[in-house]
Image: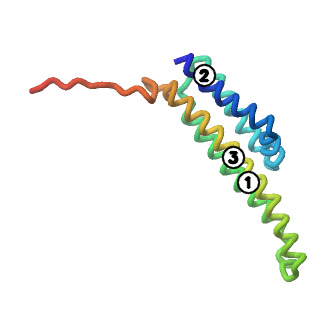
Amino acid sequence: MTARLIILNTCWLAALVAATLLGYTAFVFNGDGSRVSYVIAAILAASLALVFTGRREHIASAAWLCETLGFVGTLIGITIGLAGVDVSALQSTEGVIAAGNALFGGMATAFCSTITGAVAMLWLWSVSKVVGDGKGAPANVTNVVTVKAGA
C-alpha cells in the first residue's frame, strides 16, 4: 500500500509541477482574491502528511472540506463582483461595461477557488481509494463472506 501511495502522490505532484511550470498555479493563486485557495492547499498538505504517518480517518472529511471551501470562495467571488456594480450607472453603455468588468473581477476569485477545491478534493479522493477511509480495509478491497449451504 505504501508503494502505491507514493506512486499516486508522485503522479499528482508531477501534475502540480507541470501546472506550475505552465503558469497555471500562479494564475489560480493570484486570481483568488479571497485567498481561500491558500487554506485549501494547507488542508491538502496537512492531510497528505497525516496519511503518510498512518492516519487516514480524516481523508473523507478533508476532501469534503476542500470542496466546500472552494464553493465558499465561489460565493465570495460572486459577492465581490456584485459589490462592484453600480446599479444606477446601468443606464449608459459605459456603465454596463464597467459593471461587466467588475463582475469579471469577482469571477476570477470564484473560478480560481473552485478549481483549487476541486483538485484538492480529487487528490484526497484518489488517496482514499488507495489507503481506505480508516474504517477498515482500503476502499478498493472487497470483503468476501462465505455462506454455508443450508445454514
- Amino acid on which disc 1 is placed: Ala
> Looking at the rendering, which quadrant does residue 16 occupy?
top right
Q: Is disc 1 in contact with disc 2, using a CB cutoff of under 8 Å? A: no
Looking at marks 1 and 2 on the same chain, the residue that comes earlier in the sequence is marked by 2
Q: Position of residue 23 (x, y in %)?
A: 81, 40
Judge left or right: residue 54 versus residue 90.
left
- Amino acid on which disc 2 is placed: Ile
Q: Residue pushed farthest left?
A: 150
- Amino acid on which disc 3 is placed: Ile
Depth-wise, is mark 3 or mark 2 nearer the camera?
2
Q: Which residue is mark 1?
A: 110
Q: Position of residue 88 (x, y in %)?
A: 85, 79
Q: Residue at x 75, y 37 (%)?
A: 19
> Looking at the rendering, which quadrant does residue 5 occupy?
top right
Residue 7 got which mark? 2
Looking at marks 1 and 3 on the same chain, the residue that comes earlier in the sequence is marked by 1
Looking at marks 3 and 2 on the same chain, the residue that comes earlier in the sequence is marked by 2
Bin the neighbour count of mark 2 within 10 Å (Cα to Cα): few under 14, some 14-19, many 20 and up: few
Q: Is residue 55 above or below residue 93?
A: above
Q: Which residue is mark 3?
A: 115
Depth-wise, is mark 1 or mark 2 nearer the camera?
2
**Structural distance between the alpha carbons of marks 3 and 2:** 23 Å
